[in-house]
Image (spheres, grey):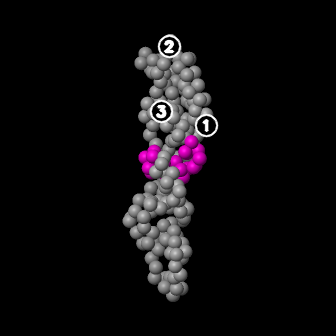
């Protein structure tokens, strides 16, 4: 299955933390928090938002917005541990990691396995099929013109042997599906 990336999804991850006591009182009070390596920093920032709330003794918060998570959707009740786990994965694997994570609906284990089976970036499926054919067998020169590498690539994709992510017109990232 071919996935086409519409725009770059890799950027700094951040969440908007809203104080629910203020929100329930009709007051918008919150802050954008950049997700960094230290989860304790995130918790300290959340506590700071609640401490500066116009409502005394505010304790509850929610994620009311987020940026930099590609196609991954965060709920307002997403755990900070999960937010950090997603952010760390995206930081470690850059844009292609974010796209694979999106392909697997946020499942980090499946995305990690896919990245372990990353075959590389090609200008087309046909280029991948040709390289694979030339690596695995010696095709006599007089027969090379009869091989339809475009169809071979398409068949690999349609059969489920591979999946692809297109990041631009001539960038096709290929992953084995087993």
Q: In what element is the residue under mark 1?
A: loop
Q: Which residue is mark 1?
A: 37
Question: Does residue 56 lie above or below 128 as drawn?
Answer: above
Q: Which mark is residue 122?
A: none
Q: Quadrant of the N terminus?
A: bottom left
Earlier sequence position, callout 3 versus callout 1: 1
Is the residue marked by circle 1 packed among few (<14), some (14-19), or many (20+) residues within 10 Å?
Answer: few
Residue under pointer 2: 57
Q: Is residue 126 above or below residue 178?
A: below
Q: Is residue 73 visible?
A: yes
- Point out the residue furthest to the left here: 159
State which tag comes first along the sequence, 3 or 2: 2
Tell me the element at label 3: loop
Q: Left or right of 72: which side holds 44?
A: right
Question: What secondary structure prevails in the magenta region?
Answer: helix
Residue at the spot of label 3: 79
Residue 91 painted magenta: yes
Magenta stretch bounds: 88-107
Does the image show residue 26? no
x%, y% of residue 46? Answer: 54, 25
Q: Do labels 3 and 1 touch, CB within 8 Å?
A: no
Q: Earlier in the sequence, mark 1 or mark 2?
A: 1
Residue 169 x, y percent position in the rendering:
52, 60
Which residue is rendered at x = 52% and y = 79% of the image? Answer: 137
Give the percent coordinates (x, y) of residue 53. Answer: 52, 17
- The answer to whether 55 is drawn above or below residue 160 in the figure is above
Quote the CA–CA distance across marks 3 and 1: 16 Å
């Amino acid at each position: 299955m071919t996935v086409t990336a519409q725009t770059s999804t890799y950027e700094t991850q951040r969440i908007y933390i809203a104080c629910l006591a203020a929100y329930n009182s009709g007051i918008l009070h919150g802050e954008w928090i950049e997700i960094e390596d230290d989860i304790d920093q995130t918790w300290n920032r959340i506590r700071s938002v609640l401490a500066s709330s116009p409502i005394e003794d505010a304790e509850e918060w929610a994620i009311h917005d987020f940026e930099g998570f590609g196609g991954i959707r965060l709920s307002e009740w997403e755990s900070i541990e999960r937010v950090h786990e997603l952010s760390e994965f995206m930081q470690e694997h850059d844009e292609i990691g974010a796209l694979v994570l999106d392909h697997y609906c946020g499942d980090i284990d499946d995305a990690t396995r896919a990245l372990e089976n990353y075959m590389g970036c090609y200008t087309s499926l046909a280029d991948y099929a040709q390289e694979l054919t030339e690596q695995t067998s010696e095709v006599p020169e007089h027969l090379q013109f009869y091989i339809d590498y475009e169809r071979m690539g398409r068949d690999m994709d349609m059969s489920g042997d591979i999946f692809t992510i297109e990041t631009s017109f001539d960038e096709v990232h290929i992953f084995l599906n087993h």
